[in-house]
Image (spheres, grey):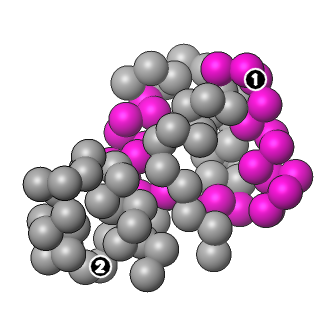
Amino acid sequence: MIVSNTTLISNLLHIDKISVLNELFGAVYIPKAVADEVKVVFSNYEEWQESLEREQIIIQPISNTIFVKQLTPFLHQGEAEAICLSL
């Protein structure tokens, strides 16, 4: 399973190359916090919406919320959730 944080997705959306993720990895999983962060800037981007609709980017719930809480004093919420999702 390939997991991403906000930085990679937002950078690829800025240059209209989000399709690279699908070409390289197929589906990419992100936690809800990352989806929320991306939506703030890119909610109207067609590429973002298409990636979600085609399930090239899949929003996955976090099961270990205790570990997320332990990481958030040191990381942003999206980064903490992405780490937990990858474990």
In percent of width and height, residue 54 lies at 72, 50
Q: Look at the numbered discs 2 and 1 and tell me whether their residues touch, using CB distance below 8 Å.
A: no
- Taking the spot 49% from the left edge, 24% from the top edge, the residue there is 43
| Circle number at residue 63 | 2
Based on the picture, tell me whether residue 73 belongs to the magenta stretch: no
User: Could one spot residue 57 in this view of the protein?
Assistant: yes
Q: Secondary structure at mark 2?
A: loop
Please state the extent of the stretch shown in magenta in the rendering: 14-39
User: Could one spot residue 46 in this view of the protein?
Assistant: no
Q: Label 1 neighbourhood size at 10 Å, few (<14), some (14-19), many (20+)?
A: some
- Taking the spot 56% from the left edge, 63% from the top edge, the residue there is 3
- Taking the spot 45% from the left edge, 33% from the top edge, the residue there is 38
Mark 2 to mark 1 CA distance (whole Å): 32 Å
Report the residue marked by disc 1. Answer: 16
Q: Earlier in the sequence, mark 2 or mark 1?
A: 1
Q: Label 2 neighbourhood size at 10 Å, few (<14), some (14-19), many (20+)?
A: few
Q: Amino acid at mark 2?
A: Ser
Does residue 71 appear left or right of residue 62 in this picture? left
Out of 34 and 70, give the one closest to the viewer. Answer: 70
Out of 52 and 84, give the one closest to the viewer. Answer: 84
Does residue 70 appear left or right of residue 11 in this picture? left
In the rendered image of this protein, does residue 20 appear above or below residue 68? above
Does residue 55 appear left or right of residue 59 in this picture? right
Residue 9 lies in quadrant: top right
Based on the picture, tell me whether residue 28 belongs to the magenta stretch: yes
Q: Secondary structure at mark 1?
A: loop
In the rendered image of this protein, does residue 18 appear above or below residue 67? above
In percent of width and height, residue 26 lies at 79, 62
In the rendered image of this protein, does residue 61 appear above or below residue 17? below
Out of 82 and 61, give the one closest to the viewer. Answer: 82
Magenta highlight: main SS = helix
Extreme-front residue of the structure: 74
